[in-house]
Image (tube, grey):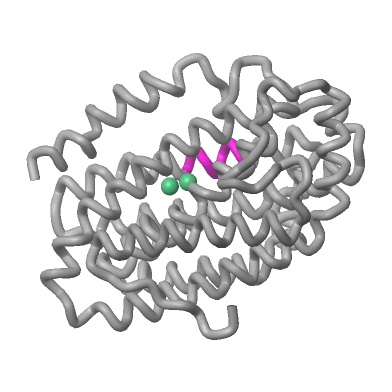
Amino acid sequence: MSDFLSAYSIQNWLESCPQGYLVDTEYGHGIGEKEAESLLENATLREESIRTTVQLVVGERCALAASSGLINAAPDYPSKRFLATQTLDEARHVEIFTQRLYDLGVKKSELQATIDQLADPNLVRFAEVLLEKIDKKDFVSGVVGQNIVLEGMAFSVFEMLHATTVGANPKFAHTLAGTIADERRHVGFGENRIGALIREFPEKKPEIEQMQKDMTYHMLATFSASFMRAGRAMEEGRKLAQELGESDTQPASWHGQNLQTATPQEMEAVLADTVLKEFKTRLARIGLEYQTPVAA
Ligand SMILES: [Fe+2]
Ligand SMILES: [Fe+2]
């Protein structure tokens, strides 16, 4: 437990995060960095960016509710302290993605209406499945749902968004980079803390596996809906990236999929594959077997 204590201590968090990779940032990006004018001027791209960012806010609000709720459910102080740092991370994520909505032109008075209108219903349901466990103060299920499933998903989604925007939109890519670093820490906590608890309470396995199955179903449905409408924005984004001549910084591929030529269906498939592979590996490490959802 001593490695666990220092790796997830508040001291370590201070040194690596606020005094580390967040030094000299505002809202997660470089000071003074702005969204590209060409993105703001392109209605298709701006709308799709708002829609995508709304899903990030919905996911991060869920993570904020979950991590703060888990503090009082945690059975030990090292976990409570770590979850307190995670709570601040998630509140920061809510703030920086909300700020991005404002940067993209959403009026403050229309924030909640925009979120209500654009939030994917399956993502909302995904969050509800997790928050039901948090409401019951079910620590083991809550940590698996949050730190393995929700954050495993977020981690890969952020990485994919980072790969596809780093050339044309360094501001957003920087915002994502700090978030990815945070999520890596959160996922690590889930794996390190929960394996022992699952061995201690094997009778909880079926319930946790059912939750993972339900969350996975809603996640895959969310991916499918968002890529179904992303075709035009993907085309416009590629055109814009070419115009901006960002080919030096833009990676050519992500997990083997060519980012210049992939269809929305191919991007959906590579994202789903990547996330599910991560789930399988991480669940196996904590002694659980991945459950395939029925209709996905
Ligand atoms: Fe987060
Ligand atoms: Fe997180």
Percent of width and height locating residue 283: 32, 64
Percent of width and height locating residue 225: 72, 66
Q: Is residue 211 left or right of residue 102?
A: left
Q: Residue at x 71, y 42 (%)?
A: 259
Q: Quadrant of residue 270?
A: bottom right
In the image, is residue 86 above or below residue 203?
A: above
List the single residue furthest toward the left: 2
Q: Residue at x 19, y 82 (%)?
A: 203
Percent of width and height locating residue 94: 55, 44
Q: Quadrant of residue 26?
A: top right
Q: Residue at x 11, y 70 (%)?
A: 200
- Between 51 and 209, the residue placed more toward the observer is 209
Quadrant, the C terminus: bottom right
Start-end of magenta stretch: 91-97
- Between 110 and 156, the residue placed more toward the observer is 156
Quadrant, the N terminus: top left
